[in-house]
Amino acid sequence: MWIHYNASVDEPRSASRPAYLIALCWALWILGAGLVMYGIWLAAALAVGGRWVLGGSAILAGSAAVLAGVGLYRVRRWGVVLFGALALLGSVNHLAGVIQRFPDLSAAAPVLAVGAVIRVLGGFLIPCGLIYFTILLWRQTR
């Protein structure tokens, strides 16, 4: 019995990655590295007051972003899951901030009120786009 090694079966997608995937991975790596450095700075600066949890959460989010970038670069589903979780948390945070500022901006001048409505609409449309993008990535991974 002969065993034939076929590299294309073991790594079908590793040779060519789309440019958007490489750009997304680089963005996640840079964002993750920045968050980890910011978290270390926060933990050191706020450790005196016992509020090191903020730094720890920034370090955790940065580490998750770096791992998501590695998983997406290797075209693995666990990378897509991490990316989807980060996108969901970021979208919820963004939407909460938009809704929190909406009453103040909607009572202001008409231009600011229209901007507030557009921000709320974007606050709902951005997560929909991220969910769609995550589903597309899920279908491309193994």
Image (tube, rainbow, N blue to C red):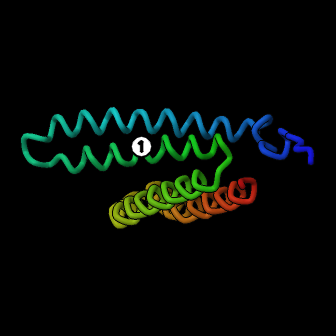
Toward the right, the furthest residue is 1
Give residue 63's quadrant in the image: top left
What is the x, y in percent for residue 66?
49, 40
Judged left or right of residue 55, residue 29 is right
What is the x, y in percent for residue 45?
16, 35
From the viewer's side, name the closer residue of 139 and 46. Answer: 139
From the viewer's side, name the closer residue of 106 and 102. Answer: 102
What is the x, y in percent for residue 87?
52, 56
Judged left or right of residue 103, residue 121 is right
Toward the left, the furthest residue is 48
Residue that badge 1 annotates: 63
Residue under the point 57% across and 41% down: 70
Q: Amino acid at mark 1?
A: Ser
Mark 1 neighbour class, 10 Å CA radius: few under 14, some 14 to 19, many 20 or more = some
Residue under the point 83% across and 38% down: 7
What is the x, y in percent for residue 130?
60, 57
Mark 1 residue element: helix
Query: Which quadrant holds the C terminus?
Result: bottom right
